[in-house]
Image (cartoon, grey):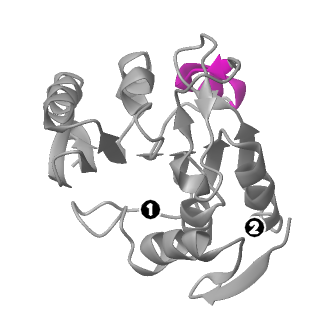
Amino acid sequence: MKLNSINTPIGRVFVRNHFDEEVVKEVILDHEYERWGDITINKGDTVIDCGGHIGSFTLLALSKGANVVSIEADRENFEVLKVNTANYGNLKLINAILWNGLPVSFLKDEKRGELNKVGGNSPKRETTTLDNVISMFDVDKIDLLKMDIEGAEYEVLYNFKNLKRVKQLTMEWHYGCTKMAELIIFLEKNGLEVVWSAGNGQWGKIQAKRIDEK
């Protein structure tokens, strides 16, 4: 696998192609997961990055002194993620498909690694839950949960028994406004106030904060 490197305000990032470069720009330069809703990352925070891809958001959080658990399903993405985060110690990496714990097919986009997702007709692979991940790494609080897992966010969040540990949430939603609206209701029932949301009818982003943590 051939890697090139690009310079960013937080250091050099290795990429495979211009699609990776676009993700780095959106996350590190444009701050697409932070710039709305007053989402913050502080030194010593615990950040869970669901959909670590090649490490753009993970690196951003690490650069601010956070302790990060980064989860990436695709094996090739995961290898680049390891390269990009090799110099950090306050980090846990896991190559796993986040879902409900049951086996599921996984659809790989051969050109754009950020678009890999659950689905398709490939042989089923083992999955894990977010509860399993935080138990594995003994996480007792989540200062920021970031999710970009191409449609699996509903299954993961609706089965997450420790959602009340989350203080802030920044995520991408998929599959239309009806499912997005249902998700917002679910978050509010669990004590998270949606402070910013946007989309184009099929996908978009949500940011939320725990009401008693504001």
Q: Nearer the viewer, residue 77 or 32?
A: 77
In reply to whether residue 161 is colored magenta, the answer given is no
- Residue at the image point whose x is 75% and y is 63% from the top: 85
Residue most toward the front?
Answer: 121
User: Whole-percent x and y of residue 208?
Assistant: 24, 45
Residue 53 in view: yes
Check disc 2: other Cα within 10 Å, few if <14, some if 14-19, many if 20+. Answer: many
Position of 134 with respect to 87 (left or right) is: left
Position of 125 with respect to 30 (left or right) is: right
Which is the main secondary structure of the residues drawn in magenta? helix
Q: Nearer the viewer, residue 114 or 130?
A: 114
In reply to whether residue 129 is colored magenta, the answer given is yes
User: Whole-percent x and y of residue 42?
Assistant: 47, 63
Which disc, if any, is residue 41? 1
Mark 2: which secondary structure?
A: helix
Mark 1: which secondary structure?
A: loop
Which disc, if any, is residue 84? 2
Residue 64 in view: no
Whether 18 is drawn above or below 70: the answer is: below
Q: Identify residue type, mark 1.
A: Ile
Which quarter of the picture shows residue 155? top left
User: Going from the N terminus, do you reach mark 2 or mark 1 first?
Assistant: 1
Q: Identify residue type, mark 2.
A: Asn
Residue most toward the top?
Answer: 102
User: Whole-percent x and y of residue 17?
Assistant: 66, 73
Q: Are marks 2 and 1 in contact (CB under 8 Å)?
A: no
